Structures are given as C-alpha cells and as structure tokens.
Image (cartoon, rainbow, N blue to C red):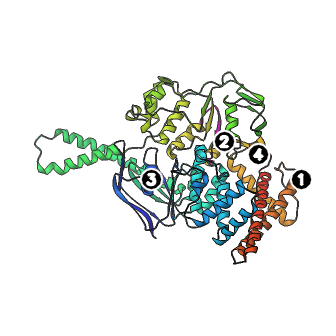
Amino acid sequence: MSTYISAENLGHSFHDHWLFKNLTIGINRGRRVALVGINGAGKSTLLKLLAGVLQPTEGKVVQTRDLRLGYLEQDPGFKNSVTISDYIFHADDAQQQAIRKYEELLENEPDNVRAIELVMEELSEVDAWEYEYKIKTILGRLDIHHLNQPIDTLSGGQRKRLALAKLLIEDPDLYILDEPTNHLDIDTIEWLEKLLTDGSKTILMVTHDRYFLDNVCNEILEIDKGKIIPYVGNYGYYLERKAEREASDEASFQKNSNLLRKELEWMRRQPQARGTKSKARIDAYYELDAKTKNGGPRQNVELTVKTARQGNKIMEIQDISKGFNGQTYIDHFNYVFKKGDRIGLAGKNGSGKSTLLNMITGGLTPDTGYIEKGETTVLGYFHQSGIVFKDDERVIDVVKNVAEFITMADGKLISASALLTLFLFPPAKQYGFIAKLSGGEKKRLQLMSILIKNPNFLILDEPTNDLDIDTLNVLEEFLTNYAGVLMIVSHDRYLLDKLTEQLFIVEEKGHVRIYNGNYSSYRLEQEDQKQQNRQDKAAGIAPSANTVPKSKLSFKQQKEISALENDITILEEQLKELNKKLNSGIDNSAIVETAKKIADMSGVLDEKSMRWLELTELKEA
C-alpha cells in the first residue's frame, strides 16, 4: 500500500510550549483516518504541518511525488480572491473557465442567446458538461448560488462552505479536513458522508461529529500526551480499545507510584558520596519519576453547577410570526414549555432556527403574537458567535467578572480559580492570556461563563463546534442530568439523539412542526415513508390515509409525489442519453441544440427534485 504522506521525528512548539515531539505518522492511500485528542493536544497544528502550510520546529514531512493535496482549515483564508468565481475556478483550467463563463452568463445575461450558444460550444469542445453538472450540484448542496458575490460579504459559515465546495470540486488525492461538518445542516452532512465514502478516497480529518466519524473513517489516530496511538477500526472499536488501554495505564501508574515511594525513601537514605554500583538504580529512579509525572488517570471536565429554582410557569409562545424582506421565517407558532422539556431544533441552514431562538431570548420582537416568560425562568444562551473575549484578558478574570465565588450543585461555594481547575484550566492557564487558548478551550470557557449564572432554561446553539470528544462526553453527561428546560440546535445527530425527546422542525415558509421523538426516529420515519411510496408506486396503488398514516399531505399532494418520482426517473435517463450524444462527436449545429436541451432539462429536474423534497418532508408530528 503506497504512502501518500509521512512524517518522522516531528515536533512543534507554540508559545514556548511543546505540543508534541518525536511523532512518526504515515497516511496510506485509500485509508480514511480520524485524528482525535483533547483540546490543545495539537490536532489542528498537526494537520497544518502535514498539509505543508506550517513548518515544524523539529523533524520533516515527506509527500509522495505529484501528490494533489486538498486542505480544509477551520477558518479558511482566500488570498487574493475577490468573488466566489475567482476562488472556485482556476485561471489555467480550460474546463473550469468555460464553466465559469457559462454560469456567469446564465446568472447575469440570461437573454444573451448568442453568447450562451458560443460558450456552450466551448463547453462541448473541452468535454465539460458532466464536470459542469458536478460543480453545479456541489455548489447547490452547499447553498452557494451567486458566483459574483464578493467573498468579504460572506459570513463565517458561508466561507467554510465555500472552501469545502472548492475542495470537493477539485477532488484531490488526499483530503485533509479540519472540522468539515461545522456550519452544515444535517441533510448536507449526510450527503457529504456519502460523497466521501464513495470510491477509495484518502482522508485525514479532525471532527467532533461522532456519527460522521463512525460512518466515514476506518482508522483512528489519537494524540495523547504528545504521542500518537493508532487504532485500526471505526470509532466504536476505538472506544473499546481505548477503555482497555486506560485501565491498563491506570494499573501501571499505581504500580509505578508505589515503587516510586520506596525508591524515594532509598534515595533519601543514601550518603552524599554514592558509589558506581548505585548509579543504575539512581538513573532508574529518575526514569520512574518522569513516568509517574506524565501518567495517571486523565482529568475530566466536571460540570456540576447549581440550577435556579423553577416555577410552574416557564414560558408561553402565543401565535408568533417573524419575517424579513418579504420572506416569512416563523409563521404563527404556538408552544407552552413544560418542566423537563428537552427539545432539539432542526431545519436547513437559513430556515429560521436562529430567528426563533432570538425571539425566545428577547433579541428579536415578533411581528405578530407574543412570548411570555415565567418570573422564575433564568435563561442561559450559548450561541454560535459566542462571547467575545479580549485577547489580552486573563482567563481567570473572565470568571471573576461574573462571580468571585460560585454555588455548586451540592450547595458548596467554591472560588473562581477552583472552578476553573475543575474545567481543566490549571493555574498556569488561569493566569495566562485568552490569546493562548485553543479554539476548543475558548468554547469551554464560554460555556462555563454561562453555566455559572445558574440558568434553569438552557439554550445551546451549535455547542459542539470546536470541542474535543472527551469534553463533549462530559457535557452530555451533565446535560443528561440537567434538571431545567433544555433546547439544542446542533448538526451533531449523536447529541440530538442522546439528549432530546422532541423536535421543533423549521420547514419552508416558516412552518414549525412539532415531532415527538429524537432525530433518528424522525429520519427512520422519513425513510419508511419513501419506501412505502416506492412500494405503492410499483403496485400501482395511490397513497392514501390508510397506507401513509403519518403523512399530513392531501390526496392531491400524495399523487403529486408519485408523479414527481416518475418524472425524475425519466428526466435522469434522458439527461444521461443527451450527455452521451454530446460527447460522441456530433456536428456543431446539433451540439448547440443538444446542449440547450440539457440546460433546460437540468433546470426542470432541479425544480422537480426540490418540490419532491418539500413534499416528502411534510409529515405530522
């Protein structure tokens, strides 16, 4: 098996602190590898070193000759690109430039028939029609539509999706991905899973999304205490082997600690003038001392803060609606929150999830209706943009600005410093500057700043971004035992499954559907519905209230779905035939006519597919 990239004796220091030393790592062709480890272990740094965007302090990285490497970083940069087109399309790629001209003409000059015909001929000459369809599909799935849009007007999420789109279009030999699921909705994540596991792609990635990790990767590399520990298998296998290893490490640590105490007594009894005979034992003592300093059971984050008392009236939402620029995002939504509610908020990017949260938390006023909060309700809102910290602010001051002493779940008062220690911020980091924290450590500090205010109605908007898996596990344990009302927006399906019992699904035109069950149950029902539709179609049976008991579609809409499925199948077959014809060497007049048919048919297919998706997602709670 050929090795695409390898590193020997790799070491890197940051702010005078060694992240790791003497690492040896190889990424073989066809392997899909996940890099895991706690925040601050150096995962993102290692990806940068292997991708060649950062030079190591020690050691070297070797890539196979002519390797096409694609790197998706957490916060992408765009160099000198001004618009989306500038970034997506390579100037020296004839196919991409022809596609760029074609797409820009369709967007900016749709009535310029002559210019479109000429560029269509160019697309045929460079055999780019299939490539054009691939590019259009990827951009559409990642919600990128206006190619002339300036990059500096894009949000952080849009920038991440744009960088991912370019990588998928280029389809490199080796994908290096740092948190690829951030800023994607769940439907898009599931599409990305299928894309990355299609064929024999070679992937090295960092992700906190455990379902994504389990479905995509077949090998795990863990960074632990500056070393790489390999596990050949998926995430489930890794968890089993890791538990066995940690149990063994803890037993070894206890044994070494007992031995060290005896050796320490011997060292203290030794006279100043030690003979040569004792030198080996003295060296062994120092080696044992080093082992116990770096060993021992790993610390975990402890989340045990107090929850404020909650009265009978928590919050009532009465007939609220909200729209912007003529578009409705939330339409006549009603709900009365109850004690123990655990709600997941789902929907596509831009559907209105954040709008609903901002109304609940008082950041937005509804256009119609009202929200009434109970007197004892204390909101805690962890939002995507997070708390803005000053880089020159010390970690401990962030907590002290909220409270010098914090009440824990058992009623005890502890100091800000003691609480930071429980959250895995040792004294050295507490008095260090925010600028030195990793992205995940900043997120952990933001979460802690919210929890110490003792909320009894906790709203978490994408809390998993940039947190390591170990911290996520402890956060989940805390939230499982959390006594207040919990509301979560997350693309992490594992988190939604584990913590929620009900979903608010924000659909098109602002309709919010209430679904009783977790996300996997919801998806399973969707798949069952599709399967039932296919079986009914094969048997020539029109869907009815008896065959589809959980559908909220009218009889007319059910018939429309059946017709759409038939139309989509026919259109896809016709497009395949037209593409074959286009690439078979037909004359110029036929090329223009055929290409126009393909463009028209693709537009119809897109419209029918979107309508089919819209209808199949309409179901009763």
Residue 343 makes an appearance in the image = no
Residue placed under numbered mark 2 in the picture: 500
Crowding near pointer 3: few (<14 within 10 Å), some, many (20+)? some
Numbered circle sitting on residue 555:
1
Q: CA distance from mark 2 to mark 3?
A: 36 Å
State the image coordinates of residue 100 (x, y, percent, origin top left).
64, 60
> Magenta stretch containing residue 481, yes or no?
yes
The kind of residue on which mark 4 rests is Glu
Q: Earlier in the sequence, mark 1 or mark 2?
A: 2
Q: How many marks?
A: 4
- How far apart marks 1 and 4 lie (CA) works out to 20 Å
Disc 3 residue type? Lys
Quarter of the picture containing the C terminus is: top right
Mark closer to the chain start, 4 or 3:
3
Residue at image position (85%, 50%) is 553
Query: Within 10 angstroms of label 1, few (less than 14), some, or many (20 or more) residues?
Result: few
**Amino acid of disc 1:** Phe
| Circle 1 SS class | helix
Q: Which residue is mark 3?
A: 48
Q: What is the distance, in whole Å, between disc 4 and disc 3 at their CAs? A: 39 Å
Q: Position of residue 394 (x, y in %)?
A: 42, 30
Q: Position of residue 458 (x, y in %)?
A: 62, 33
Q: Is residue 96 left or right of residue 219?
A: right
Residues rendered magenta in the picture: 480-492
Q: Quadrant of residue 534?
A: bottom right
Which residue position holds label 4?
508
> Can you tell which quarter of the image residue 190 is in?
bottom right
For the residues labelled 2 and 3, say whether their Cβ atoms are less than 8 Å apart.
Answer: no
Image-based side of 376 in relation to 398, left or right = right
Q: Nearer the viewer, residue 295 or 583?
A: 583
Q: Which badge, 2 or 4, is on the more N-terminal residue?
A: 2
Element carrying mark 2: loop
